[in-house]
Amino acid sequence: MRFAGVGLVMLAAICWGISGGIADILMTRGWDPIVISFYRGAVGFICFFTWFLFRFRQIWIVSKRLYIWSLLAGVGVAGNFTFYFLGIQASSVAVAATLMYTAPVFVLLISFLLRIERSTWFKWGCISGVLMGIILLTGAYNTDSLSVSLLGAAAGLAAGLSYALFIFGFKNASSIGKPQTSLTIAFFSFCLILFLFTDKGESAAVVTSSDIGWFLLLGLVGAGISFILYVIGIRKTAASTASMVAMVEPVTASLFGVLLLGDQLTLIQVLGMVLILVTITVLSVKQSD
């Protein structure tokens, strides 16, 4: 049973990694990142709402705190998807995915500010390690020849910060109600938020375009199926194990970008990626103990 849980979490992480590559393909075809993000979340919402309806009688509860935390999670996932795709557009799939996985550091810093976590030398060492990895990955050590644009780095880190917001919101919402309810409310708010910012004409054009299949695949792989697999798998997996397995996402995204999309990384960038992912993994495992 435990290995089945690990397998589901790993499969979800692979799906998330592939979704970055699909988004990159759609952007090269001229589609706006915000429109791509909107459809990813909208298809995901349909999947979660269907899942919710099947369990409606057993899981529906009325709770103001559940709604607030779920809405916060929706804001987080809207920012995460959008900034992630903007990061891909401005840099590459590999760089954007790696910077997005700095989320645990943001969670840790927010926890320090809210006095939820106690500050220790180990935690600050992990934060320093991630910062060093970011410097190597983006080329910030040489401002005359940055390997990643300022917009690409900012978008990737903003995706990580938004991911941290989603983690906070979803974790608190799930402690009150079932994940089906939390995800349905979160992605409904996601759709409302991004609908305000999307180009309505371009969004409507997606439905009749030849790329509609890519959009549906992105929504199913990158939101609907993957989140359901993750929620089911995390129940059967230790938190520390899930943290390590989730690192399959940036690895998958990087391989997709380098092998299939032609992204190029220098040796120093690869070292920066490894430093970030190893440090985040150690921090996540230590936090879960």
Image (tube, rainbow, N blue to C red):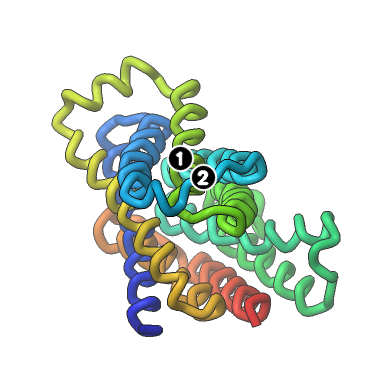
Q: Which corner quadrant of the image does residue 50 belong to? A: top left
Can you tell which quarter of the image residue 103 is in?
bottom right
Residue 164 seen in this snapshot: no
In the image, residue 140 above or below residue 47: below
Q: Mark 1 points at which residue?
A: 187
Measured along the vertical axis of the image, is residue 124 above or below residue 23?
A: below
Reading the image, the residue beneath label 2 is 77
Q: How far apart are marks 2 and 1 (CA)?
A: 8 Å
Answer left or right for 237 relative to 65: left
User: At which x and y percent is residue 277?
Assistant: 54, 71
Rendering coords of residue 141 (x, y %): 67, 60
- Could you tell me the amino acid type at mark 2? Val
**Please, what is the three-letter code of the amino acid marked with disc 1?**
Phe
Answer few, some or many: residues within 10 Å of disc 1's Cα (few below 14, many 20 plus, some between 14 and 19).
many
Residue at x-position 45% and y-position 35% = 188
Classify mark 1: helix, strand or loop.
helix
* Residue 280 placement (x, y as % from top left): 60, 71
Tell me, yes or no, if residue 25 can be seen here.
yes
CB under 8 Å between callouts 2 and 1?
yes
Nearer to the camera, 228 or 107: 228
